[in-house]
Image (spheres, helix red, strand yellow):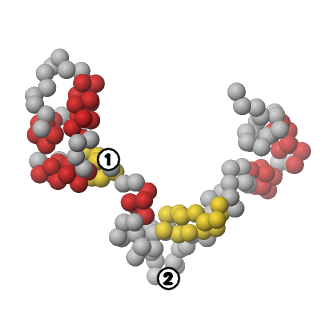
Amino acid sequence: MGVRVIISHGGTAHAIRQAVEIPFVSCEATSLDLINTLLEKMLARSSNEWISKFRNVGLSCGRVNTMDRIFNHPQIKPRNMVAEVKHPNAKKVKLVGIPVKYSETPGSVRLPPLLLDQHHQEILQDLLCYSKEETEIFSHEDVIWSPFSISHTFI
């Protein structure tokens, strides 16, 4: 798992060298040399070890979460932050729930994410008042792009 550390100049560079246990880096060292050294050192320990080491020298850091960690976080389930909805191309998909909870007007996730190109005809015709013939011309002339356009070819 990754760890994100906010790096700036001055004392922070010294704190990183102290935490990662890198000896003084000469001015001749390239950025690539430093990155390779850091990478080698970082891969040698777990993210929990790095977080502890960085915090011990006063660095601001935190874990870069993966989707499985986010969905299994202890605060996610009690706050109803995961919503499962049926999707036309899948059985069910997990979505992020409503972050703000109001007692009188509770929100909910009711619909799955839109399919690519799902409503473009309705938007053009009903909201923008183009005729069906005009929207067909738009598609054929690539004025609007659709993955389902007859004339569109991939290069």
Q: Secondary structure under badge 1?
A: strand
Residue at 21% from the left image edge and 38% from the top image edge: 41
**Residue type at the position of mark 2:** Glu
Residue at 36% from the left image edge and 70% from the top image edge: 75
Vertical arrangement, residue 7 with respect to residue 99, above or below: above
Q: Which quarter of the figure has residue 92?
A: bottom right
Name the mark on residue 15: none
Q: Residue furthest front?
A: 44
Residue at 30% from the left image edge and 53% from the top image edge: 63
Is residue 153 shown left or right of residue 55? right
Q: Position of residue 59 (x, y in %)?
A: 17, 47
* Crowd band around label 2 with a 10 angstrom C-alpha radius: few (<14), some (14–19), many (20+): few
Q: Do callouts 1 and 2 mark residues in contact (Cβ within 8 Å)?
A: no
Q: Which quarter of the figure has residue 112?
A: bottom right
Q: What distance separates the C-alpha of mark 1 from that of mark 2? A: 40 Å
Indicate the quadrant containing the C terminus: top left, top right, bottom left or bottom right: top right
Is residue 26 shown left or right of residue 104? left
* Residue receiving disc 2: 104
* Residue receiving disc 1: 2
* Crowd band around label 1 with a 10 angstrom C-alpha radius: few (<14), some (14–19), many (20+): some
Asked whether residue 64 is in view, the answer is: yes
